[in-house]
Structure formats: structure tokens, C-alpha cells
Image (tube, coloured by chain):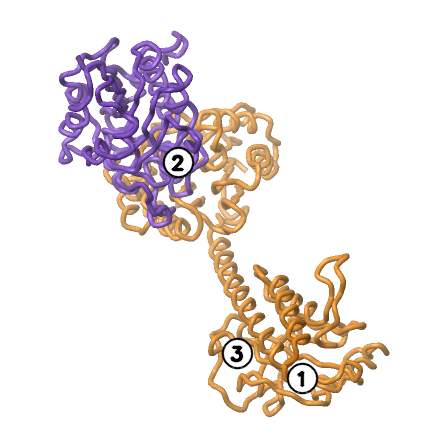
Amino acid sequence: MNAESEVAGLRLLTAAGARMAGVLDMERVARHLVAAALGEAAEAGEAAGGGFADTVGVYVVEQLIVGDELPRPPGVRAVEARRIAVGAAGTDLEPLFPSGETVVFAAGTAYAACVTGGTPQRFAELDRHFALEPRVPPPRQARERLADLSDFLLVPLRDGEAVLGLVAFARGSASGPFSDADAAVAADLAALTAGCLEGARRYQREHAAARALQSGLLPLPPGAVPGVRVAHRSVPAGRANLVGGDWCDIIPLPAGRVALVIGDAMGHGSAAAAAMVQLRAAARTLAMLGKDPAQILTWLDRITPGIGPVQFATCACAVLDTAARTAEICRAGHPPPVLLRPGGGCDVLDLPPGLPLGLDGAEYENTRVPMPDGSTLVLYTDGLIETRDRDLEAGIAALRGALAGAAAGLEDACAGVVEKLIVPPNHDDVTVMLVRTGT
Amino acid sequence: MNDPDWASGIDPNQASVARVYDYLLGGAHNFSADRDIARTLEAIEPQARAIAAANRAFLVRAVRYLAAEAGVRQFIDIGSGIPTQGNVHEIVHRVDPAARVVYVDHDPVAVAHSTALLDGEPNAAVIQADLTRPAEILGHPTVRKMIDFGEPVGLLLVAVLHFITDEQDPGAIVAELTAPLAPGSHLAVSHGTHKQQTGEAVTKVYRRAVSQGEPTLRTAGEIGAFLTGFDLLDPGLVHGPLWRPGSPDDLPDDPSRFWFLVGVARKP
């Protein structure tokens, strides 16, 4: 390898690494590789270098995309793959070979062999994969570009033992064939890309898991509980967390009663979420067993120390009786719920504060509150009102202010309160739930 | 202990007494584990921030008195925590820039922040040491260099003795620390005292979730016993806000809601 091409190879690896670093989306990782290999400038104004290849395609095995376990022992077989990025110097191959398309590399093709054997492949003529009858007539430029390709290099995307897919590089007659040094650079480039793709894949999988968890934890859809209307918002702390320790729940009960629960397991992120899920399920079960709010909190207090690393939680619990138009309410160290009266005006409910859950042995006491039709109970977590420079008392005053000027519509009122009180990025999970009686 | 290994001493997933206190005082040197604990404390005691601030305010008033009126020119502040507004050396140096202050804390984060703050301060220093081993504090080269035990010393034990359990014998620790002090030395103490359910719950949270946080709340009699052999100055052992308030407006409606007792005493 001569010094000049070695420098060019290193420069390419550095440029590709800089583009792909920290990218947490597989498609974007692949697009960065394509751009770097084609020699496209990373930023406007930067000089575009000579391309390493004239066309580049990135393929990832389909199992990875759909989230199955990784592949199967080597052997001659067909390979299902997803094209996640494609590019060509001087023309657009996207209409011909769209990203996101699933393709099958037939057993015995170089493409399939590259993936199943984990070995680079080299050939001089357009593979059948590319020669398939195009669904759209190729524009002249693209047709000429493809016809001119005369050297193909397939490199496996290896992450440890696993082969995640492959990168197909090709050059036309003017660029000349890939040298041995070029093949080594291509292998390094593929290894770098594979690492980034694997990181992105793991991130996307966790992200999807968190989303699934979160969507399963929303309170019931509107209209699902007779006798009340509900609006709610939840904003997890920080930018990275999708779930946290906050929860709220509505549990329809026999005889026109409805249990409402809001809670906040100490901590942020998945550890807090894991504790929250258990507390939420326990609260739901206790409510369905007909326990009153104080009994529910007493049991949750006993359960909390045993549920894992998160040791404390606050919670407020209410059971509405829509026929009697009253509610029994109780709290465990949780900020006090607010009651909006039907004719306007709001009261911070004067309830015994109760100790947070997890101190084991706390005593809780129900308070009965009249709830004439059109009353709105506002349940929230401390993230809504408390900040570094606003303590509980000042926060409740701010909440009262926001509620006093709130819109009449429940959804608008809920959105308005969050908008008035929260300045993103919030440092704490925020949950608020408005429940209005008499529909 | 002059060159502690910061990285190995800090576990951001474990709350620390100093960082929880820093959060309650409105400081920025705390991690999410500390904030979680502080929020739990606030759920139990909604006045937690006000109590932390009142404790800090007592420290400021006591130090100002010792420097400006009692003529004390050297101070040892044990359990000094993370530097915040109104640090001891700042108060003291306003009276006399030549007065000397040694801060002592066992928390590596607190010591690191203090070290950074005191860079270039010839008359103030910080050491990492533990109150449960008073001989190490008294024998520490920095203490020996900066403190002249032939002259009066202001020994500050503010919001720290309640983290010493009865088994660790706080009385003996105080006696050992005060034994070498010259006549005219002063001892300033603040200490958490009993408050029904709230105090027990706060104690439980610390015990369960804060490293080296095993608070023991004590009665006025038990706290007063730490000052044995000293003359207790006016107004005696009182709830924090009642100790020589700056103005009558500083007095809260119900001082007993600030459930810590304070006192300043003079060695005869």
C-alpha cells in the first residue's frame, strides 16, 4: 500500500466515524456511510473529496429490523434483507432501489454468501439483484451509471460473530478497480459501520420497549368510564427518558364508583418505571377488591419496601361515588389534589398529608369531599409544581393561578395548565390528570 | 487523606448527606439520587428547604458573633458540606482577613468543591476526615499548621452531631475535640431534635437511602450534655430561628416547626 492511498483511507475512516458517531438511528448511520464513501461533503461549504466508490448500498438482515434473534449458522441459503440506504455519485438511484425495501438474496448469490459466510465478495458484472426488471423505467443517467459499473465489492457488516448485513460498493470504468488496499479500507469501514448500527439497533430496541411500556400505562381512553370525563398529560423528565416513576390510573368500580390513583415512585427512568408498574398494578387490584383510599395506601406502604431499588413513593388516591356525588380521598406524602368547583373557583383540598409510601407503618385517613356534577378533581405529581427554585407552597399557588384562568374545556384546561407551569426540559417527571363528574 | 481518590469515592447513584443538604439549600452540586431523597424528605416535611436555610442562617449568625464580638480568630468547621452562600471564611475574613478557617468533611464531593473554592486562599483550607475519629482531625498536618491551640478556637459542629449514633458516643467525641482548646474557645452546635411522626420518618429515609446517614434525634437534655464544662451563652439552647435573630421580622410564627436546637457555649 502506498503512503498516499493509506492517508486517503484513514481520512475516509475518520470522516465516516465522525459522521456516524452517536447516531442512534440505523437508517441515519447507513446514510452517513453512503455519503462518506461517495465523498460527499459533510457540511455545506466543506470541499467534497474524491469518492471511494461510485455506488454504495447498505443492507441489513431482516431479522434485525423486525427484532428477532440473530441468525442462524452459516450455510447456503437465501437471505432476507432490508436496503436501508443507497447512493450513487452524480445520479439518484433511490427511485430504482428505494431505501426501506425488503429484498431476498437468493441462495448461491454473492450477496447471500457475503452474509451467510461473513466473507467479502468481489465480481465484475451487475448481479441479478440489480438486473431485476425495474418497476419504474430508470432515468437515462441512472441507467448509464449502472451499465458502467465494472467492479463490485461486497463487505459483511460484522459485529463480533454476528453478521448484521452487508455494504455493496461498486466502481465504474473511470474510477478503476478496487485495489487490495481499497478492500482493506472497505473492511474497516464496514466494521466501523457495524458497530454504529449495533449501537443504534440496541437503542431503538430499548426505545421501542419503553414506548410499549408507556402506551400500556396510559389511563383509559376517553369515554371508557361512565359518569366522568378525563384529560391527562405526562411528560417524563429529561430528553432521554420515555418512562419514569410517575403514574396515574382510573379504575371503574361497581355501583357507579370510580377509583382514581396518581403516584410518583422515587427516581427517574427505567428503575423508577419498574417500581411504578408494580405499585400501579397493586393499587388497581386493591381498588377492585373494594378497598377504600386509606386502605389502598396502607397496603401500598407495606408493599413498597419489597419492590426493588426504589424505596419510596408518594401517592394520592380517591374513590368517586358518582351517584352520591362525593369522593373519599387520601394521600401519602403526595401534593394535595385541587378541586375546581362547577361555578368556577378552586380549593386546594385540606387533607392530612400522610407519610410517603415505603416507611412501613404509616397511618392514613380518608377525607370525604362533596363533588357536585361538573366538579373537576385535579390530580398531579410534584414535578408539575416544584422546581429547584419553587418550593411546594409557591408551586401550589402557581397551580391555583393557572387553574383559575383555565379554559372551560377539559382537554384545553389540562394542556393549558401544563403549558403554563412547565418549562422544558423539565428535570422531573410531570403527570397531571383532570377528572370531571357529571357528563 | 490529602490526596483522596475522587472518582472512587463518588457514587452518583447513592445519595449523600452533603449533596441532599446542598439541594435543599438551592445549590447545584447534587445528583438525581440526592434530589430524589430531598423530594422524599419534602413530601414528609414540606418545610425541609426552610429548615435547611434556617440552619445555615444560624451558622452565619453564630460565626459573625464569634468573629466580630467574641474576638475568635481561628475556626474549625466540622461537617462543613458543599460550599454555598455565606461560607465561614467569607464571614470571618470580613472581620479579619488574617483569621484562619479549616473546613472538615468526610464527603469527597464536599471536599472537592471546597478545595476548588479555597484555591488561592492562604487563610482557609479543607481536609477530608471523619468526625468519628477526632484524633485524626486534631492531628492532621493542616490543622496543626493553621490552628494555634494556645489561642481560642471556634469549633463549629453544625447539623453534624445528629449523624453520630449513640453507639459511636458523640459525647466522648465532643470531649476529645474540645479538650485541647484554649480557654475562651467557643463551641457552636446545631442538632436535630424530636418531632413526632415527621422526625421518625425523616430518620428512616436517611437510614435507608443515604450513605453514612444514620440520624439520631436527641432531646434538649441530651444535646445540652455535649456542652458540659462550657458556659452556655444567651439565649441558651433554643430552636434555630430563636438564636439572636437579625431582626424581629426573622422570627417565624412557630419556631418549634424548625425542629433543630442550637447553642453557642464558651470554654471558661
Residue A398 at x, y = what percent? Answer: 53, 27
Figure quadrant of the C terminus of chain B: top left
- Local SS, label 3: strand
Task: Quickly name the residue at label 1.
Answer: A179
Q: Residue furthest top?
A: B248
Task: Quickly name the residue at label 2.
Answer: B115
Location of residue A275 with respect to B204 vertically, above or below: below
Q: Residue at x 52, y 44 (%)?
A: A235
Between B253 and B244, the one lying in front of the other is B244
Q: Is residue A162 visible?
A: yes
On whether disc 2 and disc 1 are found on a single subunit, the reply is no
**Rendered shade, chain A:** orange
In three-dimensional space, the C-alpha distance between marks 2 and 1, rounded to whole angstroms, equals 58 Å
Q: Which mark is residue A163?
A: 3
On whether disc 1 and disc 3 are found on a single subunit, the reply is yes
Q: Quadrant of residue A291?
A: top left
Q: Which mark is residue B169?
A: none
Between B149 and B21, the one lying in front of the other is B149
Of badges 3 and 2, nearer the viewer stands: 2
